[in-house]
Image (cartoon, helix red, strand yellow):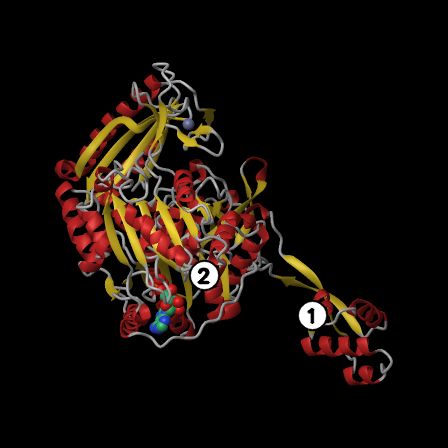
Amino acid sequence: MYAEIVVDINHSAVDRFFTYRIPEALPVRVGHHVFVPFGMGDRLKEGFVISLKETTDLNPALIKDVARIIEPYPVLLEEQIRLARWMHTAYHCLFIDALACMIPAQLRGQRVREKTVMTVSVREGINVEEQIAIRKRAPVQQAVLRIVADAKEIPKNEVGKLLPGAASAIRALLEKGVLTEGTAGVFRAPDTPVLSEVEHELTPAQKRAIETIAQARSHSERNIVLLHGVTGSGKTEVYLRAIRDCIAEGKQAIVLVPEISLTPQTVGRFRGRFGDRIAVLHSHLSAGERFDEWRRIRLGMADIAIGARSAVFAPMERLGLIIIDEEHESSYQSEKMPQYSAIDIAAQRIKDTQGALVLGSATPQLITYYRALSGRYALCTLPDRVAGRPLPEVEVINMRDEFLLGNNSIFSDRLVELLAETFAKGQQAMLFINRRGYSTFVSCRSCGYVLKCDNCDISLTYHKSEGRARCHYCGATKPLPSVCPNCKKPFLKQFGLGTEQVEEALHKLFPAVRSLRMDTDTMRTKDAYNRILSAFSAGHAQVLIGTQMIAKGHDFPNVTLVGVVAADTTLNLPDYRAPERTFQLLTQVAGRAGRDELPGRVVLQTYVPQHPVIQFARTQNYPAFYQYEIAERKKMLYPPFSLFLRVVFSDPKEETVAKAALGYAKQLETVLRSALGPDGKNVILLLVADEAPIARISGQVRYQLLIKLLRTKRLPDAIRTIYAFHASQDFACASAQLEINPQELY
Ligand code: ADP
Ligand code: ZN
């Protein structure tokens, strides 16, 4: 027998299968992690068994033997190997990079070992009752014997937990030969609370959703379901029931949530329903915990895996259901090689395992809704909040009118009035300020000079608490000059809005009110994030001020007012997704108000109150927003009607990078046109190399090649050609990064 093996070396030169002979005595199976002799001097390298075969055309004298099996069980499922083959072609990644997504990093290179503990059990042939009877004077030993006999084999420290002071009794029993020692493997488990809640009677809409998911699981076509439900409409309850049905049939499920929502509360809610049959996979686990959670899934000890993006690869052998909550989140797209989308991976896996995929969101991606309306996905809608709770009432405030009436503060009169009302009632408010898009900068009112980073082509943001201006791209800071570096006049002033400024303005108006602030400055760690949220939840402050980070996550029953200080900042970003992102953000922020019994209010402050996106956000009317925006996209042939790819070139020297980018673009166009033939004219909508929107970051000059391709049958050919061309290029002078469907276009 022979094995086809991928060697664990990260290089395109060895990105293929190597044939090894399987010695008689080695029970090698597909998916096994093995050692094989490789390269000069036959040093042992790790590898993965991709397939087995009876014969080979190679010269038998040249074929080497598999040296040994590392883990006793195959670490990869056959289904995962098929997935890796698919990724290898679809994303043009190395085979080993695809496999690396599916196994914990700790397993490669043996950095983490399985953990074992000392156990005790009753020695064979010992009569337990007799031993207990003769130990009348030693009650602790009697108790230990009972515990050990009941458990058959039990870790020593667990006996100690059940019975303080057991250690010396155990020692005595071991000495007498009544107990014997052994070892057993244990699983390091992350600590999560168990939150139990009553099981609600399902609403008719929830019932329909569960039926649709059940249908999707039993039919092989249309096995993807879009669950479109406003915030608080009971989507999570639908997930929980669908998972239960899936498990009842002996299948397993994967649940993906955005990293930021992977809070103890979320996990606790699942644990409350499903107990120990849950494994959690996320980046904040220790290496040992992550390895053990993965192992529990692989060994069939868990039926449900919850995690962020990478959990989509969880090694479920009986996968029946994948749920992706908040499917519109950009974090489901990997930016690193392989640049996969968790949604595509999930779709591929359930096609193979004949399961179902549920995409949930209050504001689905346009492309997802487009596919649902065109019948490719099944569509379920949860149009109302549960228990008859109304959606919050949204008021749009025209800030231009405020200014004309002499109010030039950052809060409208109406927002101040509602804040005062909220505080008077002992309720809480959230103030949202979207700082994305460099809305804060320092500029000279006399000559217009804008303070910029020395390394990046980016205006600096003034941070009052530090008394310095900071670059949000490279982190460099500098003190604020007292006069303008350009005209030497003392007229430098900060423009735009930041969270610090909102906090300061709030304290001027309401000196007694306590607030918490959440933005990338105040929360460098996940811990800080959870600490601020729990402090707010416990009522230690009346106001939470933050950036998009506060738009999702926790439920705060006492929040009745949400103020969006400047609704327009994302609207003006130079990106075709700006309207979609703005609508998503505004809807999500608004959804934070009135989650519990108390009704919620939302105030949107804007300079463009008539803008369709603002109006649709006011009524929280997703279908109307969709119709408006999809028409715009069609007009401009933006996605979903096309696909963007981008190559970013960077180098310290402008000349080098420009030459590389322009040369690349010209060659690629020729290659692409000849590959596509006469269709090329229609498929290539755009192929231009130019300075990137941010022309310099950390001292590197940046150029970008933007490619826009029409979504037709020829699209896969076009993508393949581009990847192949990219791989064939030699970037000795400038570095170049190819991105498919780039999430940011700076
Ligand atoms: P979503 O995930 O859509 O934001 P959730 O599933 O978290 O909504 O539900 C919001 C709240 O409503 C939760 O507190 C949940 O326990 C409750 N809930 C869900 N379904 C029902 C129901 N059928 N009847 C009553 N309450 C429900
Ligand atoms: Zn910088």
* Residue 81 visible, this angle: yes
Q: Is residue 729 visible?
A: no
Label 2: which secondary element: helix
Above-or-below relation of 375 to 61: below
CB of mark 1 near ligand 1 (< 8 Å)? no
- Left or right relative to 606: residue 291: right
Q: Residue at x 25, y 30 (%)?
A: 668
* Quadrant location, the C terminus: top left
Furthest residue to the right?
137
Instruction: Using the image as rendered, state which of residue 558 and residue 63 is in the foreground.
Output: 558
Residue receiving disc 2:
266
Q: In this view, does 577 lie to the left or right of 462?
A: left
Q: Name the residue under label 1.
A: 154
Q: What residue type is labelled 2?
A: Thr
| Relative image position of residue 246 (x, y in whole percent) | 39, 71
Q: Nearer the viewer, residue 640 or 630?
A: 630
Label for residue 533? Answer: none
Give residue 214's position: percent from left, percent from top: 31, 71
Q: Earlier in the sequence, mark 2 or mark 1?
A: 1
